[in-house]
Amino acid sequence: IGLKMNPLAELIVAPNIGSYVGDGANSRTINLPWTPDFMILFSEINDDDAVFFLTKDHTVYINEDGPGTSTIFIPKLNGSRLITAEWGNQSGRNCFYILFR
C-alpha cells in the first residue's frame, strides 16, 4: 500500500472483518488475527439468527426472543481467540465477525 514504516513495527488494520463456517462441535476455538477490545458476531441460536456483542469480560446477545447475557452456550473472547459453545458453531452455518480495537 506504499506505507513507509519501521519493518519491525506491528500494523493493525481495525476494524477487521472475518468469517468462519461452523462445524457443529460443542466447543471450538477460532483464532482471530489480533486481540480485539470489542467484537460483533453474526451467528445463530438454535437455528435462529442472532447477534453477539463480545468484550473480554462480557457477552450480550440479541435474537428474536430479545436480549440475553447469561448462559453456558454463548461464545466468549479469550485474547485473540473466540471460544464457541453450542451457540455460534452450528454445522455448515456461515458466521461473520467484526473486530474493533
Image (cartoon, helix red, strand yellow):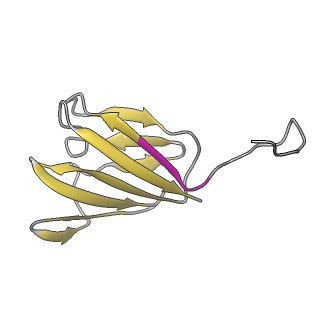
Asked whether residue 15 is drawn in magenta, I would say: yes
- Outermost residue on the front side: it is 2
Res. 85 image quadrant: top left
Asked whether residue 53 is drawn in magenta, I would say: no
64 vs 2: above or below: below
55 vs 91: above or below: below
In the rendering, at what x and y percent does residue 6 appear? Answer: 90, 41
Q: Horizontally, is 89 left or right of 100 in the view?
A: left
Q: Residue at x 46, y 60 (%)?
A: 55
In the rendering, at what x and y percent does residue 87 appear? Answer: 21, 46
Q: Horizontally, is 25 left or right of 34 in the view?
A: left
Residue situated in front as seen by the camera: 66 or 58: 66
Q: Residue at x 21, y 68 (%)?
A: 68
Quarter of the image with the N terminus in it:
top right
Q: Horizontally, is 53 left or right of 43 in the view?
A: right
50 vs 10: above or below: below
Q: Residue at x 34, y 46 (%)?
A: 96
Residue situated in front as seen by the camera: 85 or 9: 9
Quarter of the image with the C terminus in it:
bottom right
Q: Which residues fall within the magenta stretch?
A: 14-18
Q: How many numbered marks are there?
A: 0
Q: Main secondary structure of the magenta part?
A: strand
In the rendering, at what x and y percent does residue 98 appear? Answer: 44, 53
In the rendering, at what x and y percent does residue 64 appear? Answer: 10, 66
